[in-house]
């Protein structure tokens, strides 16, 4: 087997050689040998091989440091620790076939692994490779089966990776970022600070899985601890901004807390925690949402902020975190409750490249913060108590949710109109997602890809492929403003505004009528001229277009559908558009998309669209809408009569007096 051969070669090459002796001496210089428990290691310092064996015995016996993964529980996990996909990936890794879970097929990287190879031409693929994505699969397979072949393979790959990728300060391997000419695939990506931070945290996790294996020899331990030192000392030199810096601090802190034997461990830990303390205020808005404006990075940030805090609590150094820290984490978890759909899924605004499920996260934090409302959402109402509200405004980040209830059959709309730009958000202010009766009827377009298809990434980031308004199909600016927020028993009223273009502002009102359907009033206000398009995208499937009415609806034979019904205007046309959606990284599929268009001339100060968005099951509801009080488009007051099936209502809003009503 490839793994066995590599391990034997490495062991023969290193064991007892000057190279291993030198590596052990370097490691001993990096350790505080006066710490309790290291007496035998210190006494053997002149004999590197003996010292390394004593060090391995120390770590296998050490109980003073607590970790999330308890090695004593290993036997409990036999047959319960890996799922089918993890076992598949682990078995492939035994043959040096790597699966990076990015929508790409597996790839063989050679009997002698080529760590610089990106078979798919996507930078993200090689980043995942250097983050050790497949190493976690080997760990899960090892504890799941107890088969030593998985431990032997990981040890072999660790020695191979370290031997070929050097240290971050070796010019041959160093990563140098040039914004004009990004580095090609190669050693530099091994030590990209983001990859280094993620790998550092993962190394600490993996070590717990393999420490007791016969394959984890003293030679492996020396290599492992030396590379941990390289990771931590490199990371604390400089934490980069935004979410990258969180993962870097997490990696450095994980090594510092898990290996206090390093002379520099306290310095690393303190610097990493200072960074996290500062960033939880900079990267998390007062309403709790992370600044990247996308829930996948929000959930990631909860994890990146929390893991070091939790590890510090377990090991008695939590006092280094400010008193505000736990409160800000709790606020971040509230976001998931407020913006999650009734089935536990969530909208995929911005660079959300895989489904985010809020229930597992809320289940964990319900225990930590003793939140019965978190528990209710996490258990689909089986435990806990329901949240007190059905409508929430996260005004700092610009997210708003309205729902009919908390059961899985409920109707829920989540709208985005917030600040930017950030790399992971998109120019889509005013857009929304709609869920009803277990189906996401109008999902956001998603991210699709980062690096492998520049034209594809650009397409998915266009404003016109979101549920919002454009002028001549161009992307919009980020200039959000909340004008009205009035939730109520029979009417939730939201009015937001975005300075989308020079001389054109988009104002969108969303009126949730009797917790059943939505009325949208979209005004394009300003001197700008051209085609004003109001775009909508539907879930993949068939759609029915009626240009005469005009209306568009989904055509699912079972379950929920949605009807988009517009107030007819002589100058307005209904046009089909290209529609695509991506639910997983690197994957996309077609879907129905369309727009209502009004050509705006220089003598037209504003144009207005009135649209009903109606989720329903069964028969298509008869629908009517008419203006009762209809000042010119762009006015701050409007009143309408609407009929949807058996529901009739007169609704309106008055921005000047901050009022909304239903009669």
Image: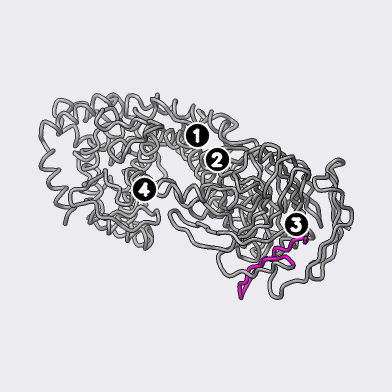
**Between marks 3 and 2, how big is the CA–CA gap?**
39 Å
In primary-sequence order, the first of circles 4 and 3 is: 4
Left or right of 660 on screen, residue 348: left
Q: Any mark on residue 242, and which?
A: 1
Q: Any mark on residue 122, and which?
A: 4
**Between marks 4 and 3, how big is the CA–CA gap?**
46 Å
Q: Residues at badges 2 and 4 in contact (C-beta under 8 Å)? A: no
In primary-sequence order, the first of circles 4 and 1 is: 4
**Between marks 2 and 1, how big is the CA–CA gap?**
8 Å
At x 78% / y 43%, what residue is drawn?
603
Left or right of 280 on screen, residue 13: left
* Chain part drawn in magenta: 549-568
Assign the C terminus to one quadrant of the image.
bottom right
In primary-sequence order, the first of circles 2 and 1 is: 1
**Between marks 3 and 1, how big is the CA–CA gap?**
46 Å
Q: Residues at badges 4 and 1 in contact (C-beta under 8 Å)? A: no
| 350 vs 548, nearest the viewer | 548
């Amino acid at each position: 087997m490839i793994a066995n051969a590599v391990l034997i070669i490495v062991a023969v090459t290193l064991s007892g050689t000057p190279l291993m002796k030198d590596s052990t001496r370097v490691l001993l210089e990096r350790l505080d040998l006066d710490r309790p428990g290291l007496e035998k290691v210190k006494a053997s310092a002149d004999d590197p091989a003996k010292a390394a064996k004593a060090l391995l015995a120390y770590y296998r016996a050490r109980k003073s440091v607590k970790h999330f993964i308890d090695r004593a529980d290993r036997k409990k996990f036999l047959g319960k620790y890996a799922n089918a996909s993890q076992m598949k990936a682990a078995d492939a890794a035994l043959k040096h076939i790597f699966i990076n879970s990015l929508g790409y097929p597996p790839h063989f990287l050679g009997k002698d692994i080529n760590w610089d190879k990106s078979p798919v031409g996507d930078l993200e693929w090689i980043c995942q490779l250097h983050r050790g994505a497949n190493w976690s699969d080997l760990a899960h397979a090892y504890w799941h089966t107890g088969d030593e072949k998985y431990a032997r393979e990981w040890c072999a790959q660790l020695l191979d990776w370290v031997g070929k990728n050097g240290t971050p300060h070796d010019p041959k391997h160093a990563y140098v970022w040039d914004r004009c000419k990004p580095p090609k695939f190669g050693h530099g990506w091994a030590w990209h600070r983001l990859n280094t931070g993620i790998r550092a945290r993962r190394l600490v996790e993996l070590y717990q899985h393999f420490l007791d294996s016969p394959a984890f020899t003293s030679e492996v331990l020396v290599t492992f601890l030396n590379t941990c030192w390289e990771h931590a000392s490199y990371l604390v030199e400089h934490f980069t901004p935004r979410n990258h810096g969180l993962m870097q601090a997490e990696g450095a802190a994980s090594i510092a807390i898990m290996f206090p034997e390093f002379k520099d461990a306290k310095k690393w830990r303190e610097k990493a925690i200072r960074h996290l303390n500062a960033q939880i205020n900079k990267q998390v808005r007062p309403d709790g949402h992370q600044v990247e404006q996308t829930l996948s990075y929000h959930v990631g940030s909860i994890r990146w902020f929390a893991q070091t805090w939790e590890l510090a609590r377990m090991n008695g150094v939590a006092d280094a975190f400010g008193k505000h820290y736990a409160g800000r984490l709790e606020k971040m978890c509230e976001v998931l409750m407020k913006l999650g759909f009734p089935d536990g899924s969530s909208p995929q605004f911005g660079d959300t490249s895989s489904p985010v499920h809020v229930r597992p996260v809320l289940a964990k934090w319900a225990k930590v913060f003793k939140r019965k409302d978190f528990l209710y959402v996490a258990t689909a109402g089986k435990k806990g108590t329901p949240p007190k509200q059905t409508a929430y405004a996260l005004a700092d980040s610009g997210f708003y949710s309205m729902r009919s209830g908390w059961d899985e059959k409920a109707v829920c709309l989540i709208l985005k109109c917030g600040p930017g730009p950030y790399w992971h958000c998109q120019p889509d202010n005013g857009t929304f997602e709609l869920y009803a009766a277990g189906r996401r009827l109008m999902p956001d377009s998603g991210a699709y890809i980062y690096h492998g298809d520049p034209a594809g990434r650009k397409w998915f980031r266009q404003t016109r492929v979101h549920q919002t308004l454009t002028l001549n199909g161009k992307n919009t600016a980020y200039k959000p403003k909340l004008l009205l927020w009035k939730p109520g028993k029979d009417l939730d009223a939201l009015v937001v505004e975005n300075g989308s273009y020079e001389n054109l502002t988009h104002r969108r009102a969303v009126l949730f009528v009797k917790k059943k359907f939505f009325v949208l009033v979209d005004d394009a206000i300003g001197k700008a001229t051209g085609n004003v398009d109001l775009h909508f995208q539907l879930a993949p499937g068939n759609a029915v277009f009626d240009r005469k009415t005009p209306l568009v609806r989904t055509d699912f034979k079972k379950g929920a559908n949605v009807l988009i019904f517009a107030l007819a205007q002589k100058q307005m046309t209904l046009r089909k558009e290209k529609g695509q959606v991506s639910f997983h990284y690197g994957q996309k599929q077609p879907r129905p998309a369309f727009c209502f268009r009004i050509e705006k001339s220089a003598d037209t100060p504003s144009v207005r669209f009135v649209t009903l968005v109606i989720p329903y099951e069964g028969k298509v509801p008869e629908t009517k809408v008419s203006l009762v009080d209809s000042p010119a488009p762009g006015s701050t007051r409007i009143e309408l009569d609407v009929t949807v099936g058996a529901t009739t209502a007169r609704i309106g809003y008055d921005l000047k007096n901050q009022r909304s009503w239903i009669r």
